[in-house]
Amino acid sequence: MAKKSKSSNNVDKINVRMYRVGTGDFFLLQFKKKTKVTFNLMIDCGCIHGGKTDFEDKVEDLNALTKGIIDLLIVTHEHADHINGFEKASPLFDKKLTFKKVWFAWTEADENFANTFRKEHAKIKMAVQGATLRLNQLKKDKAFDKIYAKDSNQPLMIQATNHFIESLNGLDELNYYSGLQASTIPTMEDILRNFKVIKGNTVVEFWEPGNVIENLAGAEGIRFLVLGPPKNNTYIKKEEVSGEGYEKRDKKSTMEMAFLNVFDKGHVTNSELMPFDDKYILQEPDANPIVTSYQSSAWRTIDHEWLFSAGSLALRHETSINNTSLAVAIQFTDSERVLLFPGDAEQGSWLSWHDNLEWSFKDKDNETKKVNAEYILNHTVFYKVGHHLSQNGTAKRKGLEMMKQEDIAAMATLDFKKINTVWLNTMPNDLIGEELIRKTKGKFFFLGDRKNILKNIKTNRVTISQTNLKNLEKWNKPFDGKIFIDYEVKG
């Protein structure tokens, strides 16, 4: 008979602290053996539109709780709402905090495939940034007033164009890098070293789907199961998957290669990327009377139309970056209860977890056990809601419907006080919100003003019981006015 492991020295509870920084992720998980904290885990530190004052008091609180020692930092992905706090509070991280170990996704490793992946994404970032700058300059110069001068709906057209530009500004803000050069792409490790988060003695590790990490010093009795990001680029590019979404899927679009080529070389030189045959290209456009005629009337021109491809390009790029999130399940080895932290993984990543992926480990009876994604979801008792409660941040059939634990709890990092206005179209998703309130029986914690968030969840498409709403109020109210929300998960 296999000898059972002694559990007296194992972590038996985890306290999850979600810091109120705005729409963005900043967590501290303290692993405990009885009442003693033996391991400090930090996950991300960011907030959209976040400034220095948004982070300082939270980082000070983090320092006091941990006595300046973070055993492990997990950085899920590169979007600003997950990492800009490291820059804003850099002096505090430098002087007061020591990080023993930092984990990144495999996409951040200094290896050929990962480097190629980053260069491709950098090219897209530069294209979006370039288009955003041009459109903002055109708006400043009132170019669209002239273009729509003879349009009967001129005010509406200008309003719509300005809204598009503002939306693109919001998407561009997610891209943390600025002034990128395709030949010198910084890794997340480079960035965190620059902000003095990673120092000389910090251990840096990279993980990929299927990895199992167990019994770290101070975290005995805990295993980490790595779910994403996927190694298959097809999954990385998927925003929404048929049958997994909570809203109607948008029309599928394709990458604008001609658009990228313009920003890569200054002008389109490859005839294969042109929208028409070579014979239709004017060899001396400046001297051509047709061109002169059209340029004399702003409303006739289409000089800037191609810039509007930046919208679909930026959205697809945001999806790809979200799907590079280092998604981890934190599991108590004895009870097999799971805390799920998917970062901003969208449905493509969720679907990849179910694609012949297995995790192998020794169970409490020292028997080899192989498990799949459904097992992990079935055992989830705490869920950090994906992508700020948006419709594409949580899978349906291969996600939320597989979470079946009676005592499950959830936290959502959504705050209307700090949010990109373009996100208001999808955050919060009412169907996911209602389902989580029902599943958790009200044990659902909101980072921002819950009354406002609930108002947007309680649509005519859903029905929420008064009992669950009262329970939600009971669980959240003790943290009103505080800079954090705490919830303890028992092993």
Image (cartoon, rainbow, N blue to C red):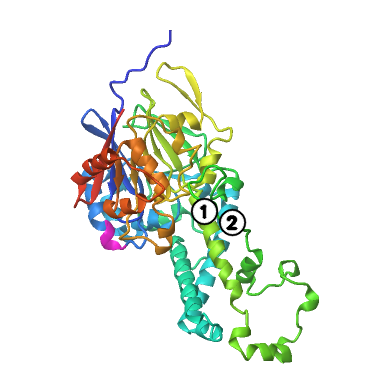
Residue at 76% in and 83% down: 283
Give the answer, above or below, for where 232 lies relative to 425.
above
Residue 91, numbered circle? none
Q: Name which quarter of the figure residue 99 lies in.
A: top left
Give the answer, above or below, for where 188 lies relative to 211.
below
Q: Amino acid at mark 2?
A: Lys
Label 2 crowding class (10 Å Cα cut-off): few <14, some 14-19, many 20+? few
**Where in the figure is residue 417, as x and y percent of width and height?**
30, 60
Residue 319, numbered circle? 1
Q: Say which element carries label 1.
A: helix
What is the C-alpha distance between the residues marked 1 and 2? Answer: 15 Å
Residue at 43% in and 7% down: 1
Q: Name which quarter of the figure residue 354 lies in.
A: top right
Residue at 54% in and 71% down: 131
Left or right of 386: which side holds 138?
Answer: right
Nearer the camera: disc 1 or disc 2: 2
**Which residue was labeled with disc 2?**
251
Give the answer, above or below, for where 299 lies relative to 163.
below
* Residue 52 is inside the magenta segment: yes
First in sequence, mark 1 or 2: give its number: 2
Which stretch did the figure color magenta?
51-55
Secondary structure, magenta segment, majority class:
helix
Q: Residue furthest right?
A: 279
**Where in the figure is residue 143, as x and y percent of width and height?**
52, 84
Q: Nearer the viewer, residue 222 or 293?
A: 293
